[in-house]
Image: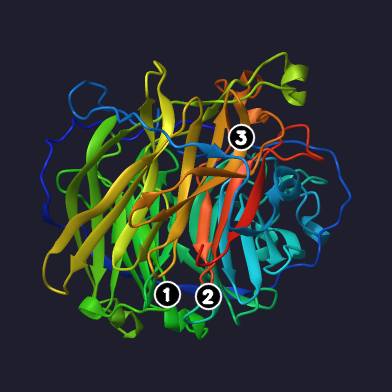
Amino acid sequence: MKRFAKMSLLARPILALLSLGLTPVLAAQTRETLQLIGSSQLDSLASTAIPSDDLRVSPHPDADGDLAGVSKGPGFASVPVITAPQSISLSPSNVSLAFNGLSHRDQRFAGTGAYANSQFSTEPPDAGLAVGSGFVLQTVNAALAIYDASTGTLRQGPTALNQFFRLKPEIARSSAIYGDFTSDPRAYYDSQVQRWFVSVVSIATNPQTGDLSAPSRLLIAVSESSDPTQTWKIYSIDTTHHGAEGCPCFGDQPVIGADAHGLFISTNAFSLHEGFAGVQIYALSKQLLASGAVSAVMHWNNPRLAGGFAFGVQPSIRSLPAPDDAANGVEYFTSVADIRNMLDHRVAVWAITNTGSLANETPALRLRTAIVETQPFGVPPDASQKTGETRLGSLLSEKTEYIATNDQRMQQAVFANGKLWSALTTMVAVGEDPNPHAGIAYFVLRPSASTGGAVRVEIAKQGYLAVANADLFYPAIAMRPSGEGAIAFTVSGPEHYPSAAFATLNQNGAGKVEIVAAGTAPNDGFSGYKYFGGGGSGRTGDYSAATVDEHGAVWIASEFIPSGPRTLLANWGTFIAQIAPGK
């Protein structure tokens, strides 16, 4: 979610480093109500008419800088030193299709009819991606679009998310009436049930001032067929009181995962008034949702992580079609062990077992965790970028020299080939360079769980992605069932404008850094300028996206700075690429 204000987490001392072990999850499991609130269909291609521009920076509680009690003392973990950084290739191999995805201009002017000219300018861009049955569905901030998977041609959209979810427009400019606030959409196509899923956080606003207010909801759209251009069912979970304290609350950055039986969503709950309110985990029956039925919603409110601090818990997407019926279905999650530590070398694995019971009237699930020692990682520095013309910065007589890389929270996770694959942005030292850089730490874990027993974790592989004189940030992993895939991310540095890139990944580690779309200018968005309340570092994203289609092709969506028309207030864009199977 985007941000306009700081929201500080509770201050607590650092807990002692614990070795690998089983810990129970100390959170009550409750059953919530899933409400079917209507149906929807994407609008046709949006109008190209361009009205006047304006902005709204929306709230995003980032861990970096917002966490009280962060440890900055020496000795807890060492900064990773990369003595043999990867090279950068400007001629990517094995890319069979590539095209521009949604840009800030697309998102700002998405919407038709009553939703025309109802969108705000928002930063940073956060990409969601789903591919299947011949379609590519992308979400970025408050917009959604569908492309042809064979040609990259736009099929539908860009559509305003408020229009798709049948909410009030973000703002009716003719009357200056504010509508529902939506943010952090995620998308997923499930080849097993041949349905599309889109999730988003929705928060009510004061119609006169636009201030956020109760109620808040987690909205889930489920397609009624394998064709996302046709009708969808829209479901709602009221999250207003889902938090440990200080509610009314909202679920920040809902992230989607799935196994053979269930759909899983995790959020970081924040109070609308007082700060962090705990991780929230939801489990629903994938099959019931695919059939158009109303599933039970099993909910864990503020699950505790003994020896750590639960935050940014990522459910994994299972690399189908191979189902896993261990423990009658198991869904794995991963997170850092304690986001409050500036440096750490521990990762947490979470497991929900007996997910096969989700289709029952009374599901019987169990949540367990384990912490494993890993390679060190820590809060990354802001990234540098190549200097160049900045249209907005020139008007303001300001310069944006850096790009915010946020924090070291775990990013997208995948369960494939019996392993849990995930990655995060980390601080690295590259060779003899005295300046720290942002790099990527990836983890390949081998977890196991039984219905009534322990969660056990072994490290199958781990490593870093880093390059000399540049920064890598916002990784997203996609893996084929065979255990081959890629990491998508953004590259920036003194010789590179923010660019979309990837590296292949398998059980032997990561390959070279390949730029699939070179940026054409510096990041020049309003979030980096003091005139708009920024701190000098522009926001280019909170996360990237990657997925695998039913044919085994890997797809990635990363942020970069494209050429062509832009708005005055921002110039970010996204790039979508297909990596051919078997290469």
Query: Considering only order in the chain, which callout, 1 or 2, is on the residue closer to the N terminus?
Result: 1
User: Which residue does the image show at 12% across and 50% down from the upper left?
Assistant: 20
Q: Nearer the viewer, residue 286 or 386?
A: 386
Mark 2–mark 1 Cα distance, whole angstroms, equals 8 Å
What colouring method underlies this structural image?
A: rainbow
The numbered disc on residue 550 is: 2
Q: Amino acid type of disc 3? A: Pro
Packing grade of label 2 (10 A; few <14, some 14-19, many >=20) is: some
| Residue hosting label 1 | 320
Using residue 5 as the reference point, say whether residue 123 is left or right of it.
right
Q: Position of residue 410 (x, y in %)?
A: 36, 46
Q: Amino acid type of disc 2? A: Glu
The numbered disc on residue 498 is: 3
Do the CB atoms of the residues marked 2 and 1 lie less than 8 Å apart?
yes
Q: Is residue 98 above or below residue 130?
A: above
Q: Is residue 362 above or below residue 103?
A: below
